[in-house]
Amino acid sequence: MASPDLVPCRPWQGRRVLLGVTGGVAAYKAVQVARNLTRLEAQVDVVLTRGAQEFVAPLSFEGVTGRPALTELFSTDGAAMHVRLGRNVDAVCVAPATADFLARAAQGRADDLLGTTLLATQAPVVVCPAMNDNMFAHPQVQANLNMLKARPGYQIAGPTAGPLAAGEGEGPGRMLEPHQIVEFIGRALGEEKVFSGLHILVTAGPTREAIDPVRYLGNRSSGRMGFAVARAAWRRGAQVTLITGPSALEYPVGVNSIEVESAEEMYRAVSEIIGAADVSIFAAAVADFRPSISEAEKLKRESTGEEVAFQIEANPDIAIETSSSRKPGSVTVGFALETSDLLANAKKKLDEKEFDFIVANDAMGEGSGFDVETNRVAILSPGSDPEMLPLMSKDAVAEEILDRVGRRLSSEL
Ligand code: CTP
């Protein structure tokens, strides 16, 4: 499955992250975490425990971060290193976090560089447990974990079920994948008061309208834009529901993702949720039409002949049909994908669909449209001049949209 590309972007770019690595076999994956964070242009300092160095060498981390990896509590250049490290970071992540680490962190032990730094820091801490499934299920491990969970600023990320070390089981104990850990660090860095705990609904992807059990009418859409908005909203601290048509993309971590197929199914799913949503963002490329009759059996060429005529009918306009159910005071964002008269067509949709903002993009423009990582958009809102944004990654466009939603929410407080 495709994972998001690593273009430098908020909230990682220019931020300082301390990655603590403890002694488990999943330590090799921590190298990828350090590399991903560095590619996102975070400044990454790595602290390895003695156990971690049995699995992976400090040099591997130096190679991917371009910074010295740290191992010693007592050293001449490390004098009060724990205090400096703790003070100078924006977020801490411990991956993998072994059972021994959880026990020591729960007790507040301070006999190595990682333990002391954790006590010295006020930055948020993401803990990514990884161990054998029986060990993870042990009541003492769970008690230690619960203690850390209750600590302000601490977030426990994972583990998941899945193949463990060779010869072991498949129960919960497997560390999250590096790109998922990076998202958790993103939430630790990106949480904003105005989004914290808000419910954000995002529609994404295409819809498929069945002609018969194997064929469909549909719109071209990868889902990238909507998925980027959902990820960015979660990083800002929102509770996110993503209602998506079929997409090859991996579901974003932390987001409640609901897959639907047809416009009708998307309409029903949105209707159920929109009344509770503080923000609704309609990024789906909904198929406007569907065959009036969906055949129960696959259509055969010998029975249709060379020319086939379909009767098609309009699908519900989800944004319009659900507008009366929107939560009072909520903010709504639509998209307009156009092939001509971009601003005029977008303005018309902004008014007709009663959006607070509409994000307009030209399907034919270079770097925007289908199956590309970038987009060039204009953002319109009632009573303001259109804002033309430069070509940027879809992740950056998502941030621009949420900046405006955040400002609108703050002005309504
Ligand atoms: N939309 C929707 N339900 C539909 C069609 C569109 O909710 N059945 C939403 C889209 O998610 C988007 C906005 O309405 O936020 C505009 O979608 P777009 O496909 O650009 O416009 P249409 O209204 O379908 O108009 P047209 O196809 O004629 O350009």
Image (cartoon, rainbow, N blue to C red):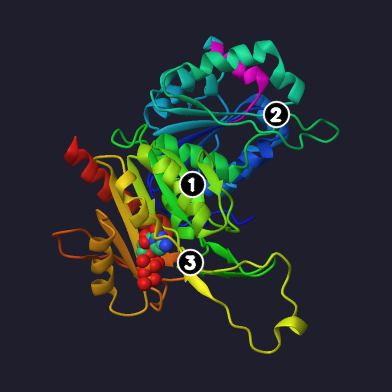
103 is higher (above) or lower (below) than 264: above
Residue lying at 48% horizontally and 37% vertically, measured from the top left: 185
Does residue 41 belong to the magenta stretch?
no
Left or right: 375, with 148 as reference point: left
Q: Tell me the crowding category of disc 1: few under 14, some 14 to 19, or many 20 or more residues within 10 angstroms, Cα based.
A: some
Q: Are marks 1 and 2 in contact (CB under 8 Å)?
A: no
Identity of the residue drawn at 23% across and 62% down = 351
Secondary structure state at the residue bearing disc 1? helix
Hey, which residue is sitting farthest right in the picture? 167
Q: Position of residue 214 (x, y in %)?
A: 69, 67
Q: To which residue does mark 2 refer?
A: 172
When the figure is inspected, residue 379 is found, relative to residue 138, above or below; the finding is below
Which region of the structure is painted magenta? Answer: 95-106
Indicate left or right for 350 with 167 as reference: left
Distance from label 1 to label 2 (Cα)?
30 Å
Residue matched to label 3: 287
Element marked by disc 3? loop
Q: Disc 1 or disc 2, which is closer to the eye?
A: 1
Examine the rendered structure and indicate whether residue 13 appears above or below residue 297. Answer: above
At x 13%, y 59%, the residue is 383
Identify which amino acid the numbered label 3 is placed on. Ala
Judging depth in this view, the residue of 350 and 11 nearest the camera is 350
**Prevailing SS of the magenta stretch:** helix
Q: Is residue 6 left or right of residue 396?
A: right
Tag on residue 269? 1
Query: Is the residue 237 above or below the residue 360 in the image?
Result: above
Q: Nearer the viewer, residue 318 or 13?
A: 318
Report the image quarter containing ligand 1: bottom left
The answer to whether residue 366 shows anywhere in this view is yes
Quadrant of residue 306 within the rendered picture: bottom right
Q: What secondary structure is found at the residue carrying circle 2?
A: loop
